[in-house]
Image (tube, rainbow, N blue to C red):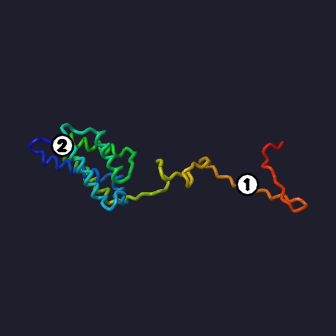
Amino acid sequence: MASNSNQTRDMVLFARGVIALLDSWDVLRLAISEGWGGPESSAKRTWLASIIVDEFETASSSPDLDYIADLILQAMSDEFDVDVDDGSAERIAESIVKLWAAEPAIATQMVAEFQATAQKRSKVQIQASRGEGNGDSDWESESEDEDGVPRLVENGAQPTTPREKPEPVIDEDGFTLVQGKGKGKH
């Protein structure tokens, strides 16, 4: 995408595209809206866009998809304490790499589409919920108790009520007789 004569204009277009992609990424939007990156969460989005653009601008050869995806995943982990495992970071990285490789006319069209998507998504409020999810979590699971130990109840089965303790047997002198647990009785 970056030719010698139009390099500055192309880099600005590329940067706008990267920012629009990050603005439309639900995972990052949620991390920012929930403040997972601290009080400067929004500034971290701009910082992430700048390090991505810098990687392309300063590299002797174009960074590949895996490198950009790893860069995004690492930044999300370090800056927002979020481990992204839904494949969305890879899709963002793929779009960034395709944008970089695109001809200027196609890149302009791609950026316009990215910006339109970002604008639509900015109007939709995104919220985190701790309800039933489809992924595993280190901090919450329906099959674990407070100590993180799995419950021994199958899905859909009702837990059995605990058996009542038998009444103590008292002999005629008023002493309580010790009863066996029933093991080994024939």
Q: Mark 2: which secondary structure? A: helix
Decide if residue 162 is on the left or right side of residue 84: right
The residue drawn where x is 29% and y is 51% is 22
Kind of residue at disc 2: Thr
Name the foreground residue: 121 vs 23.
Answer: 23
Look at the picture and state if 2 lies above or below 36.
above
Name the foreground residue: 70 vs 180.
Answer: 180
Label 2 crowd bin: few (<14), some (14–19), many (20+), radius 10 Å = few
Q: Position of residue 117 (x, y in %)?
A: 29, 53
The residue drawn where x is 49% and y is 56% is 131
For mark 2, what is the residue?
58
Q: How many marks?
A: 2
The residue drawn where x is 36% and y is 49% is 77
**C-alpha gap between disc 2 and disc 1:** 71 Å
Q: Mark 1: which secondary structure? A: loop
User: Please, which residue is most extreme toward the right here?
Assistant: 172
Quadrant of res 178: bottom right
User: Residue 114's mark?
Assistant: none
For mark 1, what is the residue?
163
Q: Position of residue 145 (x, y in %)?
A: 57, 53
Q: Position of residue 66 (x, y in %)?
A: 31, 39
